[in-house]
Structures are given as C-alpha cells and as structure tokens.
Image (cartoon, rainbow, N blue to C red):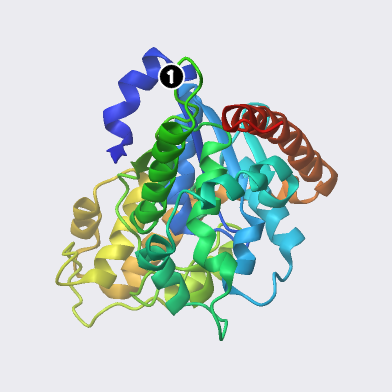
Amino acid sequence: MTELADLAEGIRADPAAHRVLTGDRPTGPLHLGHYFGSLRNRVHLQRLGVEMFLVIPDYQVITDRDLADRLAEHTENLVVDYLATGIDADRATIFTHSSVPALNQLLLPFLSLVSVAELHRNPTVKDEIAHSSQAAVNGLMLTYPVHQAADILFCKAGLVPVGKDQLPHLEVARTVARRFNERYPHPDGTPVFPRPRALLSAAPLLLGTDGGKMSKSRGNSVPLAADEDTTARLLKGAKTDADRRITYDPVGRPEVSNLLLLAGLCQDRAPEELAEEIGDGGAAALKRTVTEAVNEHLRPIRARRAELAADRGHIRQVLRTGSERANAIADATLTEVRAVMGSL
Ligand code: TRP
C-alpha cells in the first residue's frame, strides 16, 4: 500500500518501470467522487510518464446483477469520461475484459492456487454479495477476485490505483502472483509475475448529496456529464444543517464540510478559507459557491466530453486499438505461463 506522493520521485526517475492498471465497472456515468478520487490521479500518473492500462471489467457486471444492461453504452461513456478528463488514448491502453480471451484463460491456473475457504472469506466479496441485486450468489461472484488478479497480472502491472474497499482483492492478486511464482518458476529461477502494489488515493473521500457514501446507484452523486442546471439542482438539494454560520468541521458537520471540501477541490483552495468567506451566509450561500465552483471547474471537461460523445466511431476505435494491444500482451503472458507449466 502506497500513496502517490511517496512514489512520485521514483516514477519521475524511471517512468517506464511503473506499469499501472486500474478500471471502472461499466454500470453508469462517472461522478465527482470518481473524478477527484481517482481520475485526476490517473491523469497525473500518465503525465509523469507511466504506462497506463484501463480495464473496463464488463464480465464483473454479471457477478452481481442478472442483467448486464446497456453495457455498450456504459462502456463507451466511460471511454468518453477518460478522454475528456485528460487520459491520452495514444499512450493508455483502454479495453474491455471480454475482448481479451487470453486474460480470461489465466483464470484457470490462477483458480487452482486459491482455496475455496479463502474465496468465502474475502470481505469485499461479502460486501458485494450483501449489496447484490441477485437472489442467489453465482459462481462468478465468488471467484471474482481471482478474475481481477488476471486483469492485473496479465500485463504484469506493478501499481494498482484503487480505493480502500478494493484492498482485499489486491491481496488476492499478490497471493496468486506469489504462489504461481513458487510453483512455476522459470528454469533459471526468475519469477513470471511481479507482486502488484496498491496505490491509495490521497484525496479525501467525497460524500453524496444525502451525506451517505457517493455512489452511482444511490442517486446522490453529481455526474461529470450533467449539465450546469442539473448540477445546480442536485447541489441545491444537498443535505446541510440549520446553523447559518458556515464552518469546516468534518466530524461535527459532515454535510456542510463535504460541500466546502468539494468547492475547495474545484478551486484548489482550503475548505477552511472558503468557510471563512461564506461566514454567516448560510446554506444558500454555501450552495451557490459550490455550484459555481463545480460548474466552472468542469466547464472545459464537459465541453470536451460533448465533442467526444458526438464521435462514437472514434470512441470505438480507441477500444479496438486498446483491445489489440491488450491481446498482444495477454497472448505473450499466456505463452509464458503455458511454457513454465509445461503445457504443449
Ligand atoms: N473491481 C473494481 C471495482 O469494482 C474494478 C476493477 C476490475 C479493477 N478490475 C480491476 C480495479 C483491476 C483495479 C484493478 O471498482
């Protein structure tokens, strides 16, 4: 587990040594929480010169829902969000799970390295099961962390930017890599897989407009793609409290502080300073400030988003190119895996 600030120097010295992989489920539009929590970080990493892989895990969607609805639309919109926020498609490899057969084949040897008891113990899977919209838990859900290990290991990524909730999955990827290397080393003893490290975002967690965890499915987020009026309406409806004097107090006044934090992130200013400025203006003044800050910050991103969204041919081409690159790498890794395993 590492934070970006600790790594920046090492990355600058040798960007090529840092291959990064992360991904987002194609289940709906990305929102401000994704943007400040991870998208900005990725763009920053890419600008430092690391090689970036972005998996759109379409097979993960069928772990916890009966229906993978509007998959193509959600997938394309994710690519639009990536490019609009600054990911450079010429340097990043963006692809879906399902378009890289060799990645999925790695699941078979990997599954043999993990016990059924370990699969049952995974806290992230337990949590996902608790929030699942399915009546029964399917087999893919239980084995999902191993699938995610294949996402990470097929390209031998060393760094995986994730939220805290994903740390148990990353631990599975590390375990699979270690056990694979022990059981199937190259004849000269060198390991096939690096042990990937989690890269935790230093950005503070944003809450939803209801004061709960911001989430695509809870209707409490501001989507990146929302227009300015919708943004204003969503933020106007945000929960606050009755105290007219605005102060930054994340523990005592989480909702008010969250809005201050959001405005601060947009303007690159300290939330305390904004609180001071708003003073006795109350929730209405606070919401006006936040709305302006968000809309202003997102204006260029949204303009670019609209342009990109109008050219679906280009978006599909980005995915085709990404999938070709990912396939070439996955094929090479699978060839290596088959060789060390003694497959003919
Ligand atoms: N499981 C992650 C999520 O639910 C998405 C994901 C899939 C991912 N494969 C990954 C994240 C590989 C990091 C690395 O958000």
The quadrant of the picture occupied by the C terminus is: top right
Residue furthest out toward the right: 313
x%, y% of residue 83? 64, 41
- From the viewer's perspective, is residue 197 above or below residue 272? above
Q: Is mark 1 within 8 Å of ligand 1?
A: no
x%, y% of residue 161? 42, 42
**Residue in view at x 57 percent, y 45 percent:** 109
**Residue in view at x 57 percent, y 72 percent:** 64
Q: Would residue 43 appear left or right of 81 to someone viewing this image?
A: left
Location of residue 320 (image quadrant): top right
Q: Amino acid at mark 1?
A: Gly
Q: Tag 1: Cα neighbours inside 10 Å, few (<14), some, or many (≥20)? A: few
Disc 1 secondary structure class = loop
The quadrant of the picture occupied by the N terminus is: top left
- From the viewer's perspective, is residue 322 above or below residue 248? above
Q: Would residue 242 appear left or right of 50 to someone viewing this image?
A: left
Q: Looking at the image, which is closer to me, 136 or 304?
A: 136
Residue furthest out toward the bottom: 135
**Residue 281 appears in the figure:** no
Q: Looking at the image, which is closer to me, 296 or 106?
A: 106
Q: Which residue is under mark 1?
A: 189
Q: Looking at the image, which is closer to me, 337 or 220?
A: 337
- From the viewer's perspective, is residue 188 above or below residue 251? above
x%, y% of residue 212? 35, 74
**Residue 286 appears in the figure:** yes
- From the viewer's perspective, is residue 301 above or below residue 253? above
**Residue in view at x 59 percent, y 49 percent:** 107
Q: Looking at the image, which is closer to me, 298 or 97?
A: 97
Q: Would residue 313 appear left or right of 151 to someone viewing this image?
A: right
x%, y% of residue 70? 74, 67
**Residue in view at x 38 percent, y 65 percent:** 117
Query: In the rendered picture of this protein, how many numbered marks are placed on residues?
Result: 1
